[in-house]
Image (cartoon, rainbow, N blue to C red):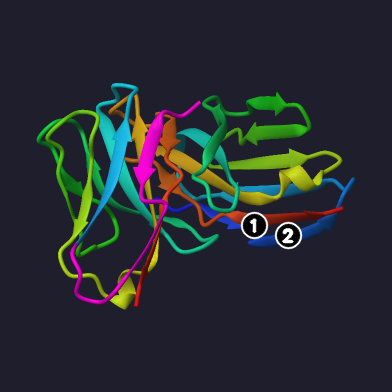
Amino acid sequence: TQLLEQSPQFLSIQEGENLTVYCNSSSVFSSLQWYRQEPGEGPVLLVTVVTGGEVKKLKRLTFQFGDARKDSSLHITAAQPGDTGLYLCAGGPRSQGNLIFGKGTKLSVKP
Amino acid sequence: EADIYQTPRYLVIGTGKKITLECSQTMGHDKMYWYQQDPGMELHLIHYSYGVNSTEKGDLSSESTVSRIRTEHFPLTLESARPSHTSQYLCASSEFTGTGGKLFFGSGTQLSVL
């Protein structure tokens, strides 16, 4: 069974700080997606990475897919209160199947 | 923008009632999903469908049932609701039936069973 472990589970920081959240597995994935979910809403896709070592930037957010396609990280520079939410990583299994979600990192950015 | 709609947004009902959670999408996506999520916690896949007349059980066992008579509509039914069914239910769709497709989520239905 393929599993995705996310860390930390909770993170509370002040506005302006930098942070990194991690998504790790012992399994190889064909792709890795990151979603953000705000309270009372459904998750919204932020990015998809498909190539080992790939780095994608979305404004202050930087996503990286590990060389072996087993792990990924999300780095936020100068966090803002609007970044508050639940960050979920989801892996596309190599064989036919549905996305596998991690348990998420709950981020709170205080003004 | 996601064109996937869930109703109702909130539902409070008594034990033993039959309920149907509605989900509709206007994107013409074949694959649709139902996830269960406790507040701020992980998503659990409970049902999915590859298209019309296709329904499959997900990773988490659920007493709910689903139907897919039309491409755009994927309702979830609980015949007899219990307090243990209290949770948020999220519907999603994807363009691709294979792995790794982007999921579009609805805003969810928050169900409370008293």
At a point 28% along the width and 45% down the height, the residue shown is: B22
Describe residue B8's horizontal placement relative to residue A43 as left or right. Answer: left
Q: Where A8 sits versus A19, above or below?
A: below
The kind of residue on which mark 1 rests is Lys
Residue B9 belongs to magenta span: yes
Q: Residue B110: image x %, image y %?
A: 42, 59
Q: Which residues are magenta?
A: B1-18
Give me the chain letter of mark 1.
A
Asked if residue A99 can be seen in this view, the reply is yes
Label 2, residues with CA under 10 Å away: few <14, some 14-19, many ≥20: some
Q: Residue beneath label 2, please?
A: A11
Label 1, residues with CA under 10 Å away: few <14, some 14-19, many ≥20: many
**Disc 2 and disc 1 in contact, CB within 8 angstroms:** yes
Q: Residue beneath label 1, please?
A: A106
Disc ID at residue A49: none
Give me the chain letter of mark 2.
A
Q: Nearer the viewer, residue A65 or A16?
A: A16
Q: Compute the Cα span from label 2 to label 1.
A: 6 Å
Q: Residue A91: image x %, image y %?
A: 46, 40
The kind of residue on which mark 2 rests is Leu
Q: Quadrant of the N terminus of chain A?
A: bottom left
Q: Where A41 sits versus A9, above or below?
A: above
Q: Residue A79: image x %, image y %?
A: 82, 44
